[in-house]
């Protein structure tokens, strides 16, 4: 049909965007909406589910100057904020310098910490800074449940940090937890802790990534707990989730958020040595897109790497084709599938409709080995807390 | 609610990043992100401060009157999330 005829078929001014936003995002953006930047693999804790297998500093860590160049690039790309983590980012001697440089260059920072190094003085310094969000991690609403996963004394350290931030009038910080089989019954208590500080609660999904490969099977919530979690979240739309539970949307109404795997499309990860991965949960060679130290920097990796371009191709629904819930759950989380040994077109291992069960059973029968970590920074000789098999859950849910 | 006859402006410390579909808006004050889902909406938001009223901004950008209700809704959402405010 000649173009002039086509014109009459198209309203001169479409009332809305021609494609839903989620579809736009699947094709990727010229720059990420936001990204995660792990500043160091050094950590004073050895959490059993650490997704970056942190512990030891990597001697090739980006220098302060290199960190500044990353921030310059993010400013040029108008990446408005980064989620800084680690390891424990406050272990970097130039931590505050990096925060100050980011704020001065219109890159907002949300950083994730175990809180150990937020004493009264650090809290006052943090409270005086702009464009800053702090997220303190706990994985139990009390020391007993938390310390089994994060190590002895870690709950007390996190609570002390919260007290210091409150005393310094930091304002509303965030308290972040990863849902496990052992803390899912404490969600109300977590919320009470957050409310007592005027803090926002953030609840995210446990992935079998990093050291989580070994503990996931025993720690991830049961199907009954997933349902409980779904309704709890549905009733509390102000609780943040980092959009991490879209696989639960197959249970009914979608949870707030984009409900989309953004890996390599709208988010990614920069690790402490400048390696760029598709998301924070896939620190593995299979999902390594490039390194910011190479020519063209981060921008070239984001826009041209084969991996990221392939993640922006229309996806195959694979084994989920015949399931009516695919539009709701999008087949779930790529990282969760990969690290339990499933194909990326298989159902999510925590598929709430149970569609992954036959695949997981087949893997178990075949004795298929799960992908081993290609970047383990655990400290040798430091035992990771051993949560499940040693001690029973604090209380049983009826 | 947006007053069609009043002047608005982008809030301080809010930045827009143009995209195919429209733009990302980020407030460094509230640390919240919003999506502007049409390039015309981006043009309207950017020109709010230059016009006495939202009506004049619509006319300057050339938004059909039939689309005003949906644009007013979008602007109202942006006002609620503190991305724009009365000037």
Image (spheres, rainbow, N blue to C red):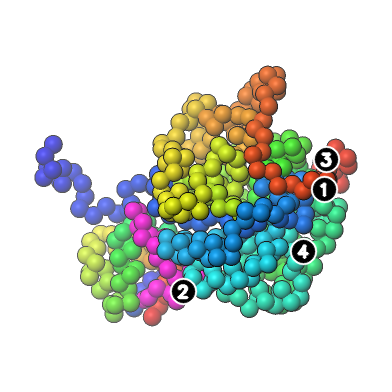
Residue on which disc 3 sits: A388
The mark closer to the camera, 2 or 1, is 1
User: In the depicted view, which residue is nearer to us: A306 or A344?
Assistant: A306
Residue on which disc 1 sits: A382
User: In the depicted view, which residue is nearer to us: A161 or B51?
Assistant: A161
- In the rendered structure, which segment of residues is drawn in magenta? B8-31
Residue at 48% x, 69% y: name it.
A106
Residue on which disc 2 sits: B13
Q: Position of residue A119 (x, y in %)?
A: 77, 72
Separation of marks 1 and 4 at Cα, in angstroms: 18 Å
Residue at 67% x, 76% y: name it.
A125
Chain hosting mark 2: B
User: In the depicted view, which residue is nearer to us: B75 or A139?
Assistant: A139
Look at the numbered disc 3 and give the secondary structure of its residue: loop
As for residue B18 lying within the magenta part, the answer is: yes
Look at the numbered disc 2 and give the secondary structure of its residue: loop
Separation of marks 3 and 1 at Cα, in angstroms: 18 Å
The mark closer to the camera, 3 or 4, is 4
Residue on which disc 4 sits: A116
Residue at 47% x, 54% y: name it.
A298
Main SS class of the magenta portion in the image: strand
The mark closer to the camera, 1 or 4, is 1
Q: Position of residue A278 (x, y in %)?
A: 53, 45
């Amino acid at each position: 049909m000649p173009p002039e005829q086509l014109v009459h078929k198209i309203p001169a001014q479409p009332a809305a965007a021609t494609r839903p936003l989620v579809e736009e995002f699947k094709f990727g953006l010229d720059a990420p909406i936001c990204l995660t930047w792990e500043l160091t693999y050094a950590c004073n804790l050895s959490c059993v589910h650490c997704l970056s297998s942190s512990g030891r500093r990597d001697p090739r860590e980006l220098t302060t100057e290199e960190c500044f160049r990353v921030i310059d690039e993010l400013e040029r790309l108008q990446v408005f904020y980064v989620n800084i983590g680690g390891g424990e980012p406050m272990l970097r001697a130039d931590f505050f310098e990096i925060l100050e440089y980011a704020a001065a260059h219109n890159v907002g920072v949300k950083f994730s910490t175990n809180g150990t190094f937020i004493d009264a003085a650090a809290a006052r310094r943090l409270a005086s800074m702009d464009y800053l969000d702090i997220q303190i991690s706990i994985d139990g609403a009390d020391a007993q449940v938390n310390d089994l996963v994060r190590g002895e004394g870690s709950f007390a350290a996190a609570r002390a940090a919260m007290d210091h931030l409150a005393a310094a009038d930091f304002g509303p910080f965030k308290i972040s937890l990863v849902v496990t089989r052992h803390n899912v019954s404490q969600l109300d208590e977590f919320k009470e802790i957050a409310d007592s500080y005027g803090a926002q609660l953030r609840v995210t999904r446990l992935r079998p990534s990093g050291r989580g490969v070994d503990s996931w099977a025993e720690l991830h919530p049961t199907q009954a707990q997933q349902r409980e979690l779904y309704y709890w979240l549905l009733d509390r739309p102000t609780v943040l989730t980092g959009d991490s539970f879209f696989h639960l949307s197959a249970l009914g109404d979608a949870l707030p958020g984009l409900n989309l795997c953004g890996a390599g499309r709208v988010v990614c990860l920069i690790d402490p040595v400048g390696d760029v991965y598709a998301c924070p949960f896939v620190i593995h060679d299979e999902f390594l897109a490039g390194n910011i130290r190479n020519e063209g920097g981060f921008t070239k990796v984001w826009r041209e790497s084969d991996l990221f371009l392939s993640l922006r191709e229309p996806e195959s629904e694979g084994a989920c084709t015949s399931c009516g819930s695919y539009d709701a759950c999008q087949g779930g989380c790529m990282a969760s599938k990969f690290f339990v040994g499933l194909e990326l077109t298989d159902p999510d291992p925590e598929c709430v409709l149970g569609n992954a069960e036959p695949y997981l059973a087949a893997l178990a029968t075949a004795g298929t080995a799960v992908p081993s970590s290609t970047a383990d920074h655990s400290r040798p000789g430091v035992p990771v807390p051993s949560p499940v098999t040693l001690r029973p859950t604090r209380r049983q849910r009826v | 609610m947006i007053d069609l006859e009043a002047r608005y402006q982008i809030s301080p410390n809010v930045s827009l990043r143009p995209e195919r579909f429209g733009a990302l808006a980020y407030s460094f004050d509230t640390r919240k992100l919003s999506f502007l889902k049409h390039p015309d909406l981006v043009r309207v938001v950017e020109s709010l401060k230059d016009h006495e009223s939202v009506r004049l901004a619509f006319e300057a950008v050339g938004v059909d009157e039939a689309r005003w209700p949906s644009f007013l809704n979008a602007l109202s959402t942006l006002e609620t999330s503190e991305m724009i405010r009365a000037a």
